[in-house]
Amino acid sequence: MSEDVAQPAVTSRSVARGLGTTVLARLGAVVEIVAQPLYVLMFGLAGYGLYAVLWAAINLLENIFDLGMTSAMQRTVPQSASDADAAAALRTAMLFGVGPCLAVAVLISVFAAELGPLLNVAAKDRDLVTPAIRIFVWALPLWAFVEIATSALRARMVFGAEIRLRIVWEQIMRLVFAGLFFAGGLGLKGLFIAHLCSLAITAALSIRLLARHYSFADLWGGRRASATARNTFWAGLSILPSNIIARLFGDAPALILNLLLPGAAGAAAAGLFTIARKLSSVVQLVRIAFTYVMAPLAASAERQDRRQVADIYAYATRLISAIALPLAAVLAAGSTSLLSLFGDQAQGAQAALIILLFARAAEALLGISAPVLQVVAAFRHQLTASIFAVAVALGTGWLVVGHLDPLTGVTLATATGLVVMAAVPMLQLAVTEKLHPFDHQFPGVALRGVAIAIAAGTTALFVSRLPDPAALPLIILIAAASIWLALRFALPFADRISLGKTGRALRLFDREAQ
């Protein structure tokens, strides 16, 4: 590693290169989706619901008590002047991100017996709740460490470093451990232990990756009160409210449903929402991949030329629309077949799944504004979207939950808040920074993308009437084909060229064209 040197221009090709490796890194989410039906099969819907509720609680607590350090590094590390500054940012993030989570884990472990009765579970799982809390709470500091470590790698623009961690260890090893412990007779307790084992291995491996991209000598011996350390701390606190609320929209509904419905019904409803959320995360993967790439690239581009930020912002929005719209349409049309993977009980989540799929598509299209806002705008602007989103979600929930079944009502309120939280940063960037992603090329891309999405969704709807063994592979094929068609015929030629080798391999343009 060396001191900072002149950086090359940040272009659409920079986004495409980072996106490819980041999508591979985030395929762990797809592995997780595949694993969920197996967990339901092994532990039952109510048992899986208890696991989902506790994991949702861990995620919420981590997003509160990491003090925003995961997001802070996306702003401060790319703008660091030296390796020592980057190490200072990492040291600050670890200290203020992992330390509070460890303290909270200790307190929860001590008061587990008092917290256990708050959860609604099946009668057969009641005696497991307190021991499960005492075991699973240690996922909190482990998860904080993993989140900060992998964020530190992304901040160094090492987008593909999560591949082995997220796919091999965090997801596949969790499934392997869960299967072994289940076969060994540990029951649902084995799932909690398996989760801890996979996180511990992931944390250990992330240390080795950090050593390749950060100076550990500067990490341990650097000056504690540097400007970079202060900027990292305050950047984290400024982003913390929006991070908490974003996580609330993902995990709080499972907790709310568990509290609304008594006994096994509460656990089952939490499980059904989690199933819908996991399936809709296929579309969310599109936004997350772009978010991970855009935050450090926008920070780097902002340091050089604001016009570079505008170019990659518009490019990313066009590419997202070509992927997310047809994907959401096909998965919504084939939702019955997809839910059959989880058993007959899971069909109760169909309305929730369709709502979340289209909300995630809208969020993907609008939500690329949020990481750009985080790195180019003043800290005070981070709160606006969060406040509006919570107000709209609460208002929607108050209006609809009493008139719909609890699962659908809570999901609709959540989805409305998600879309608002994605739309507000786009408006803020347009008003305060004079940045918007809808250039003269976007209307044509959107129109062609919507047409392809409608055609693909209609085809998938007819296919979903076939027996599930035939329908499922065809739905996956239709989804892949619709994305290819949108990339090939909706995107401008320059956007397709920017995809480089991937574009050639997928025949998005002629080999002689580049």
Image (tube, helix red, strand yellow):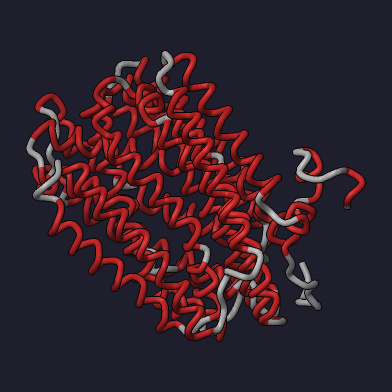
Q: In the rendered image, which quarter is residue 165 located in? A: top right
> Which residue occupies the foreground of this view, 423 or 489?
489
Residue 288 in sight in this render:
yes
On screen, residue 352 above or below 433: above
Task: Tell me what residue is drawn at x 13 percent, y 58 percent.
Answer: 399
In the rendered image, which quarter contains the N terminus? bottom right
The residue under the point 63% across, 45% down is: 486
For image coordinates 51% across by 41% down, the residue present is 327
Residue 172 lies, in percent from the top left, at 51, 31
User: Residue 472 appears at what percent x and percent y?
Assistant: 48, 22
Is 255 on the left-hand or right-hand side of 415? left
Image location (x, y in percent) of residue 205: 58, 45
How many marks do you count on the picture?
0
Q: Nearer the viewer, residue 218 or 263?
A: 263
Residue that lies at the very extreme toward the right in this rendered image: 512
Percent coordinates x, y for residue 190 in the rendering:
33, 27
Image: 505 above or below 400: above
* Viewer-nearest residue: 306 or 92: 306
- Nearest the eye: 143 or 510: 510
Please state if 168 lies on the left or on the right of 346 as rendered. right
Q: Viewed as shown, does residue 385 lie left or right of 414?
A: right
Q: Is residue 160 visible?
A: no
